[in-house]
Amino acid sequence: MTPSYPYSRTEECSWQPEEVARNLSLLTSTGSSRRSSSSSIDGHTHLLSRGWDSKNVASLRAQFGSNVLSGDEQETTGNFWVRMRLSFVPPVFSALVDQLKEPLILMLLFSAAISIALGNSADAISIGIALLIVSLVAAVQEYRSEQAIEKLAHLVPHTCTALRDGRVLDGFFAKELVTGDLVLLSTGDRVPADCRVVDSVELMLDESSLTGENHPVAKTGEGLTLSAAPPISQQKNMVFAGTLVTAGRGRVLVVAVGQHSEFGKVATELSNVTSRKSPLQVKIDELGQRLAYLSSLAIALIALLGWLLGRPFLETVTVAVSLAVAAIPEGLPICVTVTLALGVLRMARTNAIVKKLPAVESLGCATVVASDKTGTLTQNEMTARSVFTLAYPNTRFGFTGVGYDVGKGELVQATDDSGATFTRPQPVTVENKEFVALSALFHVSSLCNNATVLSSVCEAVEGHTGGNKSGQPTELALLVASEKAGVPDPRPLYHRVQEVPFTSDRKRMEVRARPVSGTHPCSALNQAANRETTPEKQQSRWSSSKVNTAPPVSADGSLYFVKGMPEAVLGECSYYCSPTGSAEKLTEDHKVQVLSQSRKMAACGLRVLAMSYGPSLDKLTFAGLMGMEDPPREGVVDSVRQLRQGGVKVVMVTGDSKETALAIARRCGILGSEYDTRDYDSDNEHMLISNATSEADLEDVEFGSSVALSGEELDAIPPHNLPDSICGVLVFYRVVPRHKLALVRALQHHGDIVAMTGDGVNDATALKGADIGIAMGKGGTDVAKEAADMVLADDDFSTITMAVAEGKGIFFNIRNFLAFQLSTSFAALSMASIATALGMPSPLNAMQILWINIIMDGPPAQSLGVEPVDAKILNAKPRKSDDPIVTRALLFRAVTSAALIVFLTLKVFKNELDDGHVTRRDTTMTFMTFVNCDLFNAYVCRSSERCFYELNFFSNPAFIWAVGGSIIGQLLVVYFPPLQETFQTEALSSNDMFYIIALSSSVLWLDTIRKKFFSNLCNDSFVPSPFAKKDDDNGKGGRRPRRSRSWLNFRGAIDSAIPKKTKSRGMRSRGNPVAV
């Protein structure tokens, strides 16, 4: 029996660095000697200096596993080409067998078997080809969609730097790692396995793919005392597979590989989540079962009736088989597959890649979009947004633009003269009087900074050799803000003398630097450097300073530059920067004002830093506050608004704090009224300024208690109460992956169709369990992309709105071609049934029935699936997942059309059957009449509301080609001699053709009467969105949405109909949460 790993995570975290190596070196011992082997007393020294010896690797891998995930281990024997080329055959064959077990397919197989038994091999071949196409397409698609689990290994890095046999091995294959291996990490590396840190130098990791937190996490080698099963966020001396090293370096020892790592646990959990069928799949299954039962009953009754009338047994069975072929719409699965596939192609052209065909339709009935915040609603890039300085307390300063692009944005200001109303923001330049005080703030933020932005830092001076930016997101945001304000990076002009890094205890970072030229580039800094200070006062200050390692203030013009948490920095300040740049006394009232403004910024979800400078650390001058955020993506606000106006609820699921989550939720329009049409975009300076000091920002912290729940609160709710407890909650914060999957399940239990968006490893299980998972293509991890049903290649959240419109249109188009196919099937079944009941010969032979059902129904029905949909349907609320696919209105249209087709066909057949014997002319006239009626019926089925003369004949080119091809095929059947023999037809005269066309065109007039006088019976009802209803009820004051020929025009139709001013209803609008 293979021994298990002997240590717990709590033990691993509690060890000191030397204990880590000592205990891991004991893994090569066996049995009871593991913990007491004398030969391993110095093993920890050997492990840290030389790594594992190669002779120990095989046994360690056998005991504790390989660094691969399930499905990644491939056979190494046999022909490689065969394994690579034919590996898909077993799963595809298995999926094909499953498809052949569907009720609709089983009925067709039964019909084909009877046809073979009766010698009708042509019928059996036709049915078999249809079955092969439908089943094979579905099987291949299922095989491709289930490759998500195997693709998880793509996130595991291929190479790393390891120590083996005393040699440092660069490019070492990560899959060759074993427990206890020593790995060297540096900036830019992706961690290859779960490891315990031995020693580190400013080691920072991005764990957002696991935890959802977008702030880098500092790692240490010191032992920690933790509780049993500590959460990832508390394991400060552990690094995890798949996370990224953003700064520093370190040595780590592997403690968990493959399935035993945190990443591997996500993979295991993902493999245990069962994919749900889409609503369309459920409805098609139900329809297939019902049609199978009804067909069986009808066949049995007709066969019994034929036998009672004295027909021979063989003839009775032949009629029954023909009725089975007529009653089952074998083209329905093909049409559904083709319709969904064409929808996928249209969406792919707009960067929405759908992996599973039914997912397109699922979006059409999605009632909830559960979105991850970091990297999905937001850009995962910190952006400076707000500035406050005591020199101008009634002026609000802020930045436009988002992200690290210096060219997109500027510093703006707005003044509050009355205490209530702000002026429209204006740009701030070096000519403005306010620039003197602001310049000191931006110089401090740049000098007390270790990040690099290539556009702002001289490469020759800094020695920059990496990409165009590097460093922590917060410091990058400060550098970009200085560039936007017109303050070039001053670091090339300074020599750094001393640096005290930021720590969680001191909560500030200090840098001492002197100007190379002896003069500061900022007047406020020059005045601080020239401030008179006596040696006695200097000595007194240094002796009382908390940081007692710095020398007295020198005469070289050096200053201290400090940034950190407002409370920590403000307590060391004695002055503040005045409008002229001079230092003025900082009173307690000033401190209260600064802390109040800091609290307002924090309530808006901003990360607030205070800046100060001075000749000594105990007499600093307060420069100001700067607030930063992870801003929403462009287009998110409009997308969320349109989804909500269309009846789709948008909720946020994030690992961030409550304040940040509520702020981003308000910014994105998740909170507030769906009719609030104000621009919340980041570039709207007026909205940013006017809401800067709103007390609503502070009230929202309490307000959020009714619409927000934390992960701890979710844990306290019993599982059976969770679906009801989360009703009305729009923001879930401080959640972990298990919470996300539980939320998806709870929403589904409540009857919602859930679309889950995400981009990290922690989102994978929820993406898999949701009705439709949506991953981000650019910023998303491989595991999220493979677990999702749809990938947004451009990370544009607004593409979801277009996908929802596509899903709605597809379902209504499916109903249209279903009405066409059912009317054809009902007509063929009824015609044969009536003829049998009246003792008449069969009007059509078996091949003619197959032609009608497979050849004729295929192309026209498929073209109906791409019919452009009216904006009225696109604006409708999501349909319920339990809505029947076959409605009363659909049946009314199908039955009335079938009744007219049967009447006209039997009338022609009765007229031709004058001598009591069936001739080729009789069946040809009947056959041609039926087909022409069917084609006219296909045309009117393009819309459930508009009459044939209201339809644009050229709006659906696919329909023109389909009907044109069907007409050509029908003419060949009637006039081409070889096909005449196969279908038992003969050529008709021109008079016969004109008579048939005139007679069958009555289908158009029947449809007009239905839609004009019985519209309530033949139109499929739908619930319009509140926005669409409001526009229809007003009838004026806003333009009516233009009918869209394509789902691509959905956004235009919505934008053109948005009213200029709409009174907010329900929840009070909180305004823009970002203070400037």
Image (tube, rainbow, N blue to C red):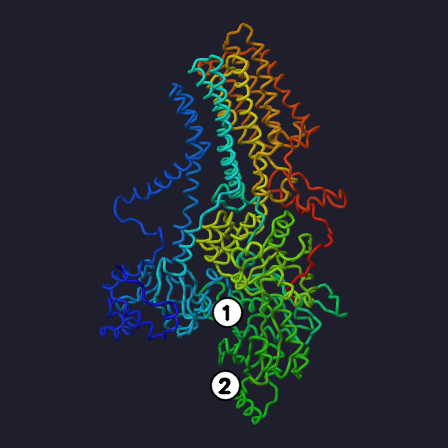
SS at mark 2 in the image = loop
Provide residue 571's location: percent of width, then percent of height.
59, 81
Q: Which mark is residue 550?
A: 2
Tell me how many marks there are: 2
- The answer to which of marks 1 and 2 sits earlier in the sequence is 1
Q: Which mark is residue 451?
A: 1
Provide residue 670's location: percent of width, then percent of height.
62, 56
Q: Is residue 212 visible?
A: yes
Compared to 539, does 18 lie above or below? above
Compared to 983, does 426 lie above or below? below
Amino acid identity at mark 1:
Ala
* Residue shown at 42% from the left, 51% from the top: 272
SS at mark 1 in the image = loop
Left or right of 381, for residue 38: left
Provide residue 477's location: percent of width, then percent of height.
55, 67
Q: Where is the N terminus found, in terms of image quarters?
A: bottom left
Compared to 18, does 125 lie above or below? above
Q: Where is the C terminus found, in terms of image quarters?
A: bottom right
**Distance (Cα) linking label 1 and label 2:** 24 Å
